[in-house]
Image (tube, helix red, strand yellow):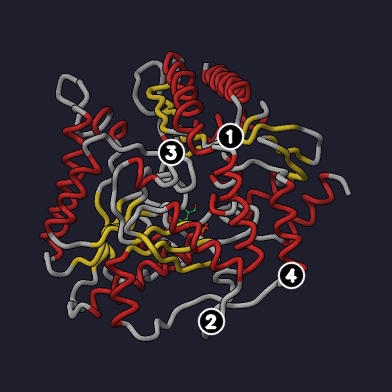
Amino acid sequence: MHTRDYQALDRAHYLHPFTDFKSLGEEGSRIIERAEGVYIHDSDGNRILDGMAGLWCVNLGYGREELVAAATEQMHQLPYYNSFFKTAHPPVVRLAEQLVKLAPAHINRVFFTGSGSEANDTALRMVRRYWALKGRPDKQWVISRENAYHGSTVAGVSLGGMAPMHAQGGPLVPKIAHVRQPYWFKEGRLGEGRSQEGSPQDPDAFGRDCAAAIEAKILALGEDQVAAFIAEPVQGAGGAIIPPESYWPAVKEVLEKYEILLVVDEVICGFGRLGEWFGSVHYDLKPDLMPIAKGLSSGYLPIGGVLVGDRVAETLIEEGGEFFHGFTYSGHPVCAAVALKNLELLQSEGVVARVRDDLGPYLAGRWKALEAHPLVGEARSLGLIGALELVDPASGERFDASRGIGTLCRDLCFAGGLVMRSVGDTMIISPPLVITRDEIDELIEKARGALDDTLARLT
Ligand code: PLP
């Protein structure tokens, strides 16, 4: 079959996620056929550097035979069995043990799911159940952040803070509130935080303001009514929002003051993205619950879960009786076997430490240099996640959103052999963690080329 044959079938029958279905009629999909290392190959023979690790998930890179072998072996041994009703199997218990070893010391239990969305659904049910068991059933509100992404199930959408998602398919899950995100470039640099003379707000003052907004929301909802705060350590899909250093310490103080559980969504930041096993370790957080997925299996098979801290786990176990919750594919043996092998390889190859000590700092230096480009208002990165804020070179301000400059840059980037994602006019990278320095150089040159091509279209 040729590209156009695949595209015809695709157009006729396949409803894609996060896609304007009608637009496929005009453009057709890019058909990705195979991949190795950090590169994907399309059906027209193009080789493209995957600067997004699929969807922030292929941490070990493509084509890892060890993961294929782990899946094959487990398929032969036990392709499926569940862990409902007092059954288990070797890969799931071994994976639980490994995860607990890697997690912060106060976390000793795991609940498995099939995805990150299901992990967040599970977390929501657990926090409300926890407070009910503690004799405080009024503690039901969950506070999240604007523009957060926590998945696409109804609970995931409700916990997330994406206005276009809230506008479709409601009503949403009740008693979920949203506060401002710690997006310094948008608010402190270009937005209302800026002084009348145009100088940006101090980032740390801005971070503290964002934490104060959480306290204000708690007081508005009623301080006895709030069950949990949920957040990604670094917001991913919202635009790779790296919070100011002051933000997390101030948030921790607020949550402790009002006895509010902390749910840290590690679906993107977990498994090395920020140079530690979890984003929570980088920011010194002590989460009660940590939803995980994606990098847990490097995306080779779908698996997610919730790492459950002792305070919640002990209450659910000792006082909860049966928790009426679970999925057919919770702890699927083949997914668990692949995840286990993935964790083993991340450890034996020293991938996470290399991101922290070598690749992250290397990328940071090269990425920051892109700020010299006339289109770039800010270049930020942490570990192997990064963002470029596109601005109008004439004014240094944002482009009118209707011009779709970010989308143009993304398409030119793809045409030039690099996958970068656009969130409005913010360009994002999150490459496989096994990327080499030379491949980082290639990524930077291709990104610069896409910026040049975008600029050329403007003038
Ligand atoms: N949480 C975060 C932070 C995510 O980025 C995502 C997916 O991008 C999810 C949850 C949802 O995960 P899944 O797509 O596996 O349901």
Could you say where residue 410 lies in the image, as x and y percent from the top left?
57, 33
Could you say where residue 71 lies in the image, as x and y percent from the top left?
71, 59
Q: Which residue is mark 1?
A: 51
Dot in front, 4 or 2: 4
Q: Mark 4 or mark 3: which comes first in sequence?
A: 4
| Mark 4 vs 2: CB contact within 8 A | no
Identify the element where label 2 is drawn.
Answer: loop
Q: Mark 4 or mark 2: which comes first in sequence?
A: 4
Q: Which residue is mark 4?
A: 77
- Note whether 449 is above or below 85 in the view shown: above
Q: Badge 3: few (under 14), some or many (20 or more) residues near its Cα, within 10 Å?
A: many
Q: Quadrant of residue 334?
A: bottom right
Q: Residue, x 56% and y 81% (percent of image)?
A: 87
Identify the element where label 3 is drawn.
Answer: loop
Question: Disc 3 residue type?
Answer: Leu
Is residue 457 visible to us here? no
Dot in front, 4 or 3: 4
Could you say where residue 282 lies in the image, as x and y percent from the top left?
35, 40
Q: Badge 2: few (under 14), some or many (20 or more) residues near its Cα, within 10 Å?
A: few
Q: Which mark is residue 84?
A: 2
Question: Disc 2 residue type?
Answer: Phe
| Mark 1 vs 3: CB contact within 8 A | no
Could you say where residue 390 lies in the image, as x and y percent from the top left?
43, 27
Identify the element where label 1 is drawn.
Answer: loop
Question: Disc 1 residue type?
Answer: Gly
Q: Which residue is mark 3?
A: 274
